[in-house]
Amino acid sequence: MTDAGAAATIDTRQSERKVILASSLGTVFEWYDFYLYGLLATIISAQFFSGVNETTGFIFALAAFAAGFAVRPFGALLFGRIGDLVGRKNTFLVTMGLMGVSTFLVGVLPNYASIGVAAPVLLLLLRLVQGLALGGEYGGAATYVAEHAPDGKRGLFTSFIQTTATIGLFAALGVVIAIRSAMGEDAFADWGWRIPFLISVILLGVSLWIRLQLEESPVFRRMKAEGTTSKAPLTEAFGRWENLKWVIVALFGAVAGQAVVWYSGQFYALFFLEKTLKVDGATANILIAIALALGTPFFIFFGWLSDRIGRKPIILAGCALAAITYFPAFQLLTEAANPAMASAQRGAAVSVIADPGACAFQFDPVGREKFDSTGCDIAKSALAKAGVSYASITRDRDSGTPAEVRIGQRILIAPEPWRLPEQDRAAAADAFRGELAAATASAGYPAKADPAAIDRPLVVAILFYLVLLVTMVYGPIAALLVELFPSRIRYTAMSLPYHIGNGWFGGFLPTTAFAMVAATGNIYYGLWYPVGVAVLTLVVGLIFLPETFRRTIHH
């Protein structure tokens, strides 16, 4: 090779590294912003939803978290269209600015105690802006990097973009853990939680400066010069069946399963540790951070591997493993993180035996229902509030027999308010709740996980396995989506299925799963949601999803 050729090769490699680094750092910043809210859902619930009970407030907080995901497809349509019309680079500069400003404003937003109901309303509006911005960010970054990558290396190059979601979460975890440890739980819960949001303005400045150094994608520059850019990317992407069919296949045959595996492994696992297994927040954050640190390099490994064996087998294998192993994995997580709870579940299983017609649906979306009109309702609401998993056993309808709670061999008879004088009903219900609390405690059900009893190496190993499944489904997904669609509508067409999948199937997962648990009493019942979606993707993907890793994208 001549000196000129060697110099050109070096310049090309430096340019490629700059593209990957700048795109990845910017996207890390956006994910850091977005995930702060999820990590602090419990504290934000207390700050902004204090007008309702604790369980409903947490569900509200998760719903506001999911609201940011709900609008992501609309952000994909808005910014995807702009990206296909005016360019990739300028579009994701705008999305980054929107994300950064809205995140900073969360940090200065007055809480419920200060301005009442306006606080959660303003919080929701800021979450919606974040969701719109993120809806436009990912497609632009993935398309931009893929269009700079040489053939045969798109999986590797775009896998660095895939690490950004986890690195952003890891960065958010690191900041939260550091501030939490430095100032203590009480001060952090009172006002210190605002600091991670406020310092994001510094990250915003750095990320914008880095991205301003980039040039436009070579593929887009070529289309612009040739006059072949799309004049109506939305119509072309979704109004023509030859493109729309691949949007549908991409959604159900790849992205939906990828999304639920991702959010189960990184978010639901964290919420499960905190809310269900009663592990304190700081410990849960540290354990998931270690697992993420161990698992993150595998995004790049599976991206690289997909350049050799294809995207499809890796993504679908991750979905299959998730569907097969989620239930035993989360049951083992209970054994490792809260062995007292696991022991109590084995030795003193709890069940509620009642006429199903006398039992309300135990999910309270507005925080107004007291669940005290029947013995079944009183029993189930008390168990749910204590975090005790129970099974529902059907008794013959209209038998007239009061509801029972069985804790191992012990049987408690729930009071039936309709049989008592009105003035005695509240006292009878309170007395039963006290008796039930004492019975579950004596059966070994703990109020919180014992830190000394947590098998930390085993918890990290389980969490690492869940993250490894995330890397399998997520590492190759950007390259697959880029390769599915022509360059003139690529930003628009790939962004919509990605953000419907991750925004709706994935973003609503924590809220949906916890609602399923609240409704049934079974702490593992929420896993049916990701398992079902993963199976759907496995079937659709096997039948309809094409392999794309040998395609050219310069057209």
Image (cartoon, rainbow, N blue to C red):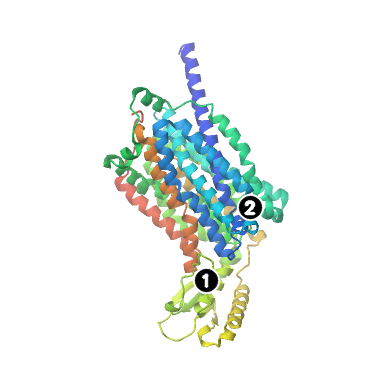
Residue positioned 61% across, 37% down in the render: 203
Residue 357 image offset from top left, x and y in percent: 42, 78
- Give the amino acid type for the residue marked by disc 1 in the picture: Glu
Q: Of the residues under marks 1 and 2, which one precedes in the sequence?
A: 2
Tell me the quadrant of the picture where the C terminus can be found: top left
Residue 98 image offset from top left, x and y in percent: 53, 40
Q: Nearer the viewer, mark 1 or mark 2?
A: 2
- Callout 1: SS: loop
Asked if the residue at tag 2 contacts the one at tag 1, i.e. Cβ–Cβ closer than 8 Å, the answer is no
Using the image as rendered, state which of residue 101 and residue 206 is in the foreground.
101
- Tell me which corner region of the image, top left, top right, bottom left or bottom right, holds residue 381: bottom right
Callout count:
2
Using the image as rendered, state which of residue 478 and residue 118 is in the foreground.
118
Tell me the quadrant of the picture where the N terminus can be found: top left
Residue positioned 46% across, 73% down in the render: 360
Which residue lies under the disc numbered 1?
369
Q: Which mark is residue 110?
A: 2
Residue 407 image offset from top left, x and y in percent: 55, 76
- Tell me which corner region of the image, top left, top right, bottom left or bottom right, holds residue 340: bottom right
Q: Which mark is residue 143?
A: none
